[in-house]
Image (cartoon, rainbow, N blue to C red):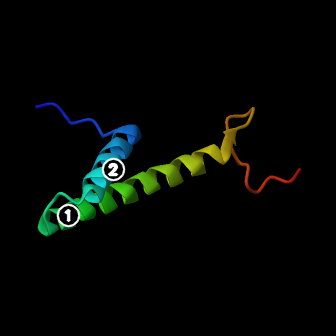
């Protein structure tokens, strides 16, 4: 059995866009709307977590001696 690879950020955004479009269409039942809204909020949270993780990584660089340096606290 092969492991399922994690869904890419871009795929999550596309899925979120599709859910929003369906919700905005007004053509789905209330019960289905609630399910889709719940799923959309879950995906939005996952995307937010990914972006925060990336932001943390970007805030650091590798120095010449292979140590991470926090750019947010670096004085000019």
Secondary element under disc 2, as helix, strand or loop, is helix
Q: Viewed as shown, does residue 31 lie left or right of 53?
A: left
Q: Which of marks 1 and 2 is in front?
A: 1
Q: Mark 1 points at which residue?
A: 33
What residue would you read off at disc 2?
Answer: 16
Q: How many marks?
A: 2
* Precedes in sequence: disc 1 or disc 2: 2
Residue 27's quadrant in the figure? bottom left
For disc 1, the neighbor class at 10 Å (few under 14, some 14 to 19, many from 20) is some
Look at 41% across and 52% down and name the residue there: 47
Extreme-right residue of the structure? 76
Q: Secondary structure under badge 1?
A: helix
Callout 1–callout 2 Cβ contact below 8 Å: no
Does 56 sit left or right of 71 as displayed?
A: left
Place of residue 63 in the rendered image (x, y in percent of width and height, measured from the top left): 73, 36
Residue 42 visible in the picture:
yes
- Tell me the CA gap for discs 1 and 2: 13 Å
Residue 13: x %, y % from top left: 38, 45
Q: Can residue 67 be seen in this view?
A: no
């Amino acid at each position: 059995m092969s492991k399922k690879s994690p869904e890419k950020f871009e795929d999550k955004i596309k899925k979120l866009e599709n859910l929003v479009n369906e919700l905005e269409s007004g053509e789905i039942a209330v019960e289905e709307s609630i399910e889709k809204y719940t799923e959309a909020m879950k995906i939005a949270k996952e995307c937010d977590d990914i972006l925060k993780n990336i932001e943390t990584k970007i805030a650091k660089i590798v120095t010449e001696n292979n140590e991470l340096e926090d750019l947010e606290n670096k004085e000019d």
